[in-house]
Amino acid sequence: MSEELAKVNQLESFRDELDRLRAAQQEPADTVQNQPHTADYDLVVRGRRIMTTAGLAERELGISGGKIVAIEPLGSNLDGAETIVLAEDETLIPGLVDGHVHVNEPGRTEWEGFATATKAAAAGGITTILDMPLNSIPSTVTDPALEFKQLVARPQAFVDVGFWGGAVPGNLDDLRELHDSGVFGFKCFLLHSGVDEFPPLNADQLETYLERLRGFDALMIVHAEDSRAIDRAPSPEGDGYAKFLASRPRGAENLAIAEVLERTRWTGARTHILHLSSSDALPMLRSAKTDGLNLTVETCPHYLTLAAESIPPGATAFKCCPPIREASNREALWEGLLDGTIDYIASDHSPSTLDLKDLGNGDFAVAWGGIASVQLGISVVWTEARRRGIELAQVVDWMASRPADRLRLRDKGRLALGYDADMAVFAADDAFVVDAGRLHHRNPLTPYDQRALSGVVRRTFLRGSEVDYQTPGGRLIRRGLA
């Protein structure tokens, strides 16, 4: 079957549902509800620990129309229709930005969905997520598929949601239309993605796609593992984590990253390395940045906090690709974060149903590879960071400001004048024990279950309105217009 015929068949499979959703929804007007009151601001937040762009300070924020419009010293007595006074143990931080979330809806909503994923994000202090182009059905590789996903997401979102497009063989001519429709960039794999409907690019195709994307300044984000190296690695069958780790060697990641760097160098395109797990790649990434490549790198909470040596037999909740590596590797990743080689942290929230994790047998070859953690990211990272003497402001920079900058989210990621009043109340010294059954994730499975964590998100605000987990208040956002 030709690629064009396959594309036509894919569109036919969801055309009726797309038409139904178009008819059921109208784009909401961007209006501000003006409550009759005499106060100067809709909301005032006062506290001794407000995380401003100049650091922690005693401040009052004035919020109107969903924006931060005043930042004054504590004691200024700003007049708000509603006033919130932070407790002594609370810090007001900017809403976090997670650029790597697999929501999976439509098509695999039993894995996760926009309602559950965005509630979980809000509970973790995240006010903006970017949805990956897989594992939904259809994948977000054409403009109609993007519209379909947007129509499904719009009435369910509890935080703001943007979308990545996909770069797969055969959709080169779809990239510009997706870009013009507001996707934040394009994701590709350099090996099998885990789902057949999202095939990988080879290195030469990657170069061709990068050349096309450079023409309209679009970002390519890459799952960098080399299929040839993995094909020659040992088989991962069984419940032993060491065997699974050997099946996804560092060399596979290093080879693929080297390929991305050279194709980036040759084309002058903008690229981003997803979920870095191999610390061996840090020197060449550092060198590429020194050479001036337009490149950024992310890593994930699980690579910074977990270690291969501690994963029990059959514990497939820990399976992800690339894998969680050794403790020594984890230490080097922290060094890469601190020296700026790694730019920021994203969750790579990639959940599945319990049966797909093969919990009964614990076979790492059979289980779906993905970590469920979007609700827990700030607490997981903060627990480890404070042990290392790293300040909360640095953690928030890695999880809010820096991703917002790379994604060109002009009014997200900071508590600053003119920015969206996306905020979280964080109690850094409070603690809790993770109960997977009480998370908002659709499926109660995470490798952090029963783990004691520091730092509690007590309240989350989206454009100055508190998330109540009952009424969706999130918006769909476009590249450059958030």
Image: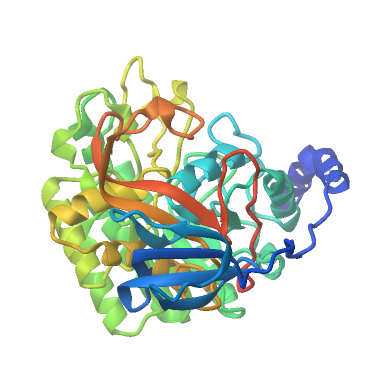
- Quarter where residue 183 is shown: bottom right
In the image, is 351 to the left or to the right of 23?
A: left
Q: Residue at x 78, y 47 (%)?
A: 8
Q: Residue furthest right?
A: 23
Q: Is residue 168 visible?
A: no
Q: How many marks?
A: 0
Q: Is residue 426 visible?
A: yes
Q: Residue at x 20, y 72 (%)?
A: 339
In the image, is 394 to the left or to the right of 28?
A: left
Q: Residue furthest top?
A: 360
Q: Position of residue 430 (x, y in %)?
A: 26, 44
Q: Residue at x 49, y 48 (%)?
A: 122
Q: Is residue 69 above or below residue 50?
A: below
Q: Is residue 37 above or below residue 350?
A: below
Which of 52/442 is in front? 52
Q: Position of residue 289 (x, y in %)?
A: 30, 79
Which of 66/108 is in front? 66
Q: Residue at x 40, y 54 (%)?
A: 425
Q: Position of residue 267 (x, y in %)?
A: 47, 79
The structure's colour scheme is rainbow
Q: Quadrant of the C terminus?
A: bottom right
Which of 207/79 is in front? 79
Q: Is residue 353 above or below residue 94?
A: above
Which of 244/290 is in front? 290
Q: Position of residue 340 (x, y in %)?
A: 26, 72
